[in-house]
Amino acid sequence: MNSELIVTNNILINAPVEIVWDILTNPSQTKKYMYGSETVSDWEVGSELLWKGTWEGKEMVFVKGIIKAIEPGKHLAYTTIDPNSTTVEDKPENHLIVTYNLAKLEKGALLAVTQGDYAIAVDGQKRYDDAIAAGGW
């Protein structure tokens, strides 16, 4: 049995949890840090989550997934895949799960982010190694 391959980052943020949540889910905010991509979703379990933007003058979806769990201001889990990949087929077993867990601190917030499990996805080790090399989150 394979060991799990999960990218994990814990990020201390000098801002209230409510502001961090807004930055993670508000399209006008995500556009600022996700290479011009806006989140598009109704933020309900089972709904699509798209990361849309423009590339070479053409609107496109860069990343897509499904909301798996949500507790506003505290927890978000969604699947993710690059629908434009020529090497990873867009089927459920190749989707990764991203989670955000927010905790209020005395001064700011702790954002715990995970992405995986690469071990059960096609080309998982390579995708995991590439994510680690890029610094994860």
Image: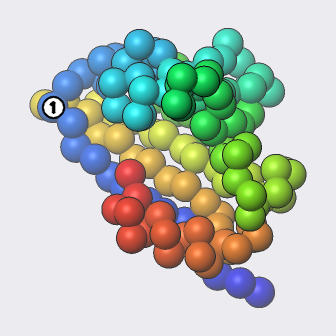
Q: Quadrant of the N terminus?
A: bottom right
Hey, what amino acid is under mark 1?
A: Asn
Colouring chosen for the image of the structure:
rainbow
* Relative image position of residue 109 (x, y in whole percent): 26, 34
Please identify the quarter of the rendering in which residue 88 is found. Answer: bottom right
Residue 104 seen by the camera: yes
In the rendering, at what x and y percent does residue 5 appear? Answer: 58, 72
Count of numbered circles on the image? 1
Residue 8 x %, y % = 43, 60
> Which residue is under mark 1?
14
Q: In percent of the image, x 80 and y 27: which residue is there?
A: 46
Q: Is residue 59 left or right of residue 47?
A: left
Q: Position of residue 122 (x, y in %)?
A: 76, 70
For the point 70% across and 74% down, the residue is: 123
For label 1, the crowd category at 10 Å Cα-Cα, with few meaning under 14, some 14 to 19 and many 20 or more, is few
Residue at 67 percent across and 72 percent down: it is 124
1 relative to 15, above or below: below
Q: Residue at x 73, y 43 (%)?
A: 83
State the residue lying farthest toward the front.
56
Residue 3 lies in what quarter of the image? Answer: bottom right
Is 55 in front, or is 22? 55
Task: Answer left or right for 15 relative to 100.
Answer: left
The secondary structure type at the circle numbered 1 is loop
Residue 4 shows in the view: no
Horizontal placement of 115 versus 20: left or right?
right
